[in-house]
Image (cartoon, grey):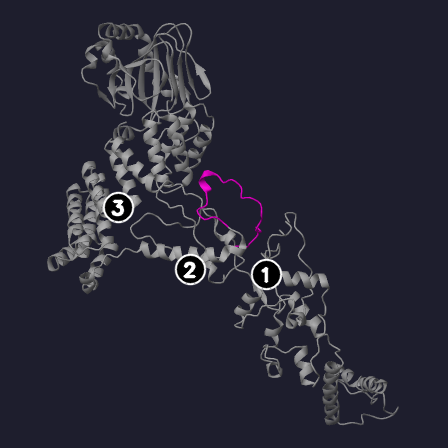
Amino acid sequence: MAQRKNNKSHSRKEVKTPPVESKNGKKTEGGGAGGGAGGGPKYSVFTWVVVLGLLGVWSSMAVVYFDIVDYDSVIARAKEFRLNFSDVLQGKLMAYDTDGDGDFDVEDAKVLLGLKEAEPGAVGASPETTGASERIVEPTNQQAAQQQGEEPKEATSGDPAAEETPSAAVPLPSIEDDFIPDDPREDVAHPYEDEVDTIDTTGVLVEEPPSQESIVDSGRYVTSSEVTQESEPAVTAEEPSESPAEPPPEPEQQPEPVLEPEPVLAAEPEPAPEPEQQPQPEPEPVLEPESQPQTETRPETGSVPEAEGSTEKLKEKAKKKKPKLFNKFDKTIKAEIDAAEKLRKKGKVDEALRAFESLVQQYPQSPRARYGKAQAEDDVAEKLRSNDMLQRAINTYREAAELPDATSDLLMAALKRRAERQQFLGRMRGSLVTLERLVQIFPEDISLKNDLGVAHLLLGDNKGAKKVYEQVLAAAPNNGFAKVHYGFILKSENKIAESIPYLKEGLESGEPGTDDGRFYFHLGDALQRVGDNSAYHWYELGHQRGHFASVWQRSLYNVEGLKAQPWWTPKETGYTDLVKMLERNWKTIRDEALAVMDRNTGQFIPEEENLREKGEWGQYTLWQQGKKVGNSCQGVPKTCSLLEKHPEATGCKRGQIKFSVMHPGTHVWPHTGPTNCRLRMHLGLVIPKQGCRIRCTTETRQWEEGKVLIFDDSFEHEVWQDADSYRLIFIVDVWHPELTAYQRQTLSPI
């Protein structure tokens, strides 16, 4: 052995000079270490080439035979720098692959040298590192093998092949501040399992698929009642992600299915999120009402069946979203129907209508052609703003639904659209009849029953609506849409305490149709009446969702951009002439009001808006929605004559002019008016010295005889009458001063 090493070192000294020659590019006078002291070079170029070739061969054999190069360390370093050593050598040393594992390694070299296989221990890893690597890699080995197109191999502690596999010499990840130790109840879960890039013992860079917990995020409920609340199931559970570095889309930004005739669900895999959150055994935190998840996240060990079930549900839902509108006969003329439909979708509604009319004449038995004709008429009606054309469309929808071979999807689509257009024209009873027919045809469809309940409410038939929603809740106790409407009906019946759980649970469900300002309004109002301060939490949620201008200003029919403050001065309103007239003539106005009270107190109608907790409160109205009320001015002619000179009051279509008498012991609940388009003036006529007060937001004031108070009644206000005698005031509503003349003319009455 010593002799061979000396020869090796001697040969290295003999070839030390030639590299110097090649580096300088010149010939030296001396021949080399073994040459004489005298003359020039003694060897030809061919001789040096042969010597170098022999040295290279012997050096290579020595490297392999004496294990001079630690291939285990090389492989480990390749893993450390995220390199696939097998891929690097693939195509170069594939010819020397003797064990069929797809790469050239130490074992292949030993086989080539004729050595017998031994069972050496793992090189380059401590026992702690080896154990940790085995725990990390165990759930991902199969995935790594599948990505490389190989057979998945499970490595167990008793498998010799697994023991021979060298572990990567990579330091373990540092422990973060939010590190959570392993739960001894979990067999597979490990705190490092969710690292983005996990290294397994084969040297392959493995990217774990996103965990179910990260994908099935809490479906935040969307602010519009037209948007669904379902959490998107994880489509990426079947396919590996292409861009694991991209963060998951925010729930608010993620497109959600809208209640349109043909919603389209995304079928492509979403970008995989970085699994920063680890599965924890701790209980889930309580979510806000707007973020209740539809799918419960479970531990990782049970996530695979859940993902498969979610995917199946998604596929089923995608199938349901595509209505089948063609019967067997329609399919024979599908090309012609598609051509006409293409015109309609391109906005060429007149041409589309002519095309569908021609199809109906040729094929009167075709439900799809007649349904297309109804849609085209509907589009033309909207284009021309023609109620006559819309009525034609309503009739054609009925004709399409009455054809004998119409598919069930076409039947439902035609009748639902017919009911919607009937409601648009104000034909509420006709819409109710259409929906009743739909419920008879599709008795298992809960959404149709919910729509039927709304139709009853639009007719003012609360009893009929209540009956429908009781049927829905009997069949589907957790239906949020039915709950909020049922709670709304209970509150209108003054069943305050009973209405609260239905309104609250319905809003918390986040189902389509529940995110409505009226439900937040009535839930908060009900909570206030039972003394529950959580009312302002729901008012705040309503404000955050855009239903209220603020927690205090909760009117529902508003014009944006108007100045908003609870109390006003006459100068701020710009109606100083009106205020001066009222205060100058307050005794005349008072005397006429007292005369009416003395002659016929029946003209003071009790308040009917359910605003009183207790007491008596009567009103005598002169103007409402910008028009005189009957012959009420005959009892107070001077008062009406004075007001007719002020159109900002008499022409206020969103206000009233009336006398208000409140008797002792009366309390008016905190409430808000319906609109921010008006301001309210109170002229004191008969005011007891003590006990009468009004609060608007956080400021409380008292009336004075002959003086005008001005406030914006779209802000929360409350009234107490604790005096010994009645209180009489004159209420005059005026347009908000910032409304234009056009707005005052075109705004709808309230």
24 over 428 or under it: above or below = below
In front: 579, or 621? 621
Position in image of residue 618 (x %, y %): 29, 14
Residue bearing mark 2: 268
Q: Is residue 288 magenta?
A: yes
Element marked by disc 1: strand
Residue bearing mark 1: 197
Q: Residue furthest right?
A: 37
560 over 216 or under it: above or below = above
Marks 2/1: CA–CA distance: 23 Å
Task: Give residue 134's quadrant in the image.
Answer: bottom right
Range of magenta residues: 273-297
Element marked by disc 2: loop
Marks 2/3: CA–CA distance: 35 Å
Residue bearing mark 3: 443
Instruction: Give the position of the N terminus as an image quadrant.
Output: bottom right
Q: Earlier in the sequence, mark 2 or mark 1?
A: 1
Residue at 37%, 55% (x, y): give it.
265
